[in-house]
Amino acid sequence: MATAEESPKTQSQTVLVVDDEVLVRMVIADYLRECGFRVIEAGSATEAITVLASPEPVDVVFSDVQMPGDMDGFGLATWVRRHQPWIKMLLTSGNARAAQTAGDLCEDGPLEQKPYHPTTILARIQQLLGR
């Protein structure tokens, strides 16, 4: 799936994939690893904030909007914007009405609709990172 051309450019960049659906999270995380990214996985916004509050460098957060718990993907995006605004955010949702709110929180593009294709997410992440 990944080309040799993609790997050297992405090796030092980290994507935090946040989704409570383990199989969905694993598929996109594995694909991004094959493309040369360093990937950290989280099953909730709370887990993601724990990673973000650690010394672990993160370049992009790719998160589902709808997750169980005290905070959803919008809450996570708000937290990132307030506390670590240099980190790029990309949200995904199966709910079309979520696009407007996502657009307000993610200045580089609102939202990827579910179901998405992994190559589409790769292209969006590369766009966010300026490639």
Image: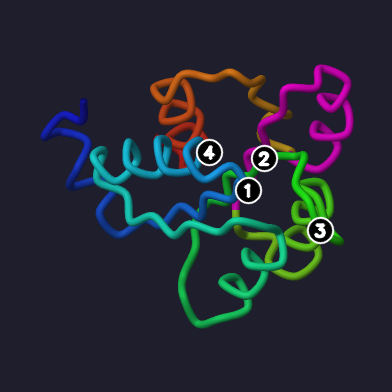
Query: Between disc 3 and disc 1, whose residue precedes?
Result: 1
The residue depicted at 50 percent of the width and 82 percent of the height is 55
CA distance separating discs 3 and 2:
13 Å
CA distance separating discs 4 and 2:
17 Å
What segment is highlighted magenta in the picture? 88-106
- Residue 81 x/y as whole percent: 77, 58
> Which callout, 4 or 2, points to the residue nearer the camera?
2
Q: Amino acid at mark 2?
A: Asp
Q: Is 130 on the left or on the right of 19, as rendered?
A: left
> Which callout, 4 or 1, points to the residue nearer the camera?
1
Residue bearing mark 3:
69
Residue bearing mark 2:
64
**Is residue 34 a member of the stretch shown in magenta?**
no
Q: Residue furthest left?
A: 4
The residue depicted at 63 percent of the width and 75 percent of the height is 50
Query: Between disc 4 and disc 1, whose residue precedes?
Result: 1
> Which callout, 1 or 2, points to the residue nearer the camera?
1
Query: Between disc 1 and disc 2, whose residue precedes?
Result: 1
Q: Amino acid at mark 4?
A: Leu
Query: Between disc 3 and disc 4, whose residue precedes?
Result: 3
Query: Between disc 3 and disc 2, whose residue precedes?
Result: 2
CA distance separating discs 3 and 4:
28 Å
Q: Badge 3: how crowded within 10 Å, few (<14), some, or many (20+)?
A: few
Q: Residue furthest bottom?
A: 55
Residue bearing mark 1:
20
Whether the residues at callouts 1 and 2 have beta carbons within 8 Å, the answer is yes
Q: Residue 128 bears which disc, if any?
A: 4
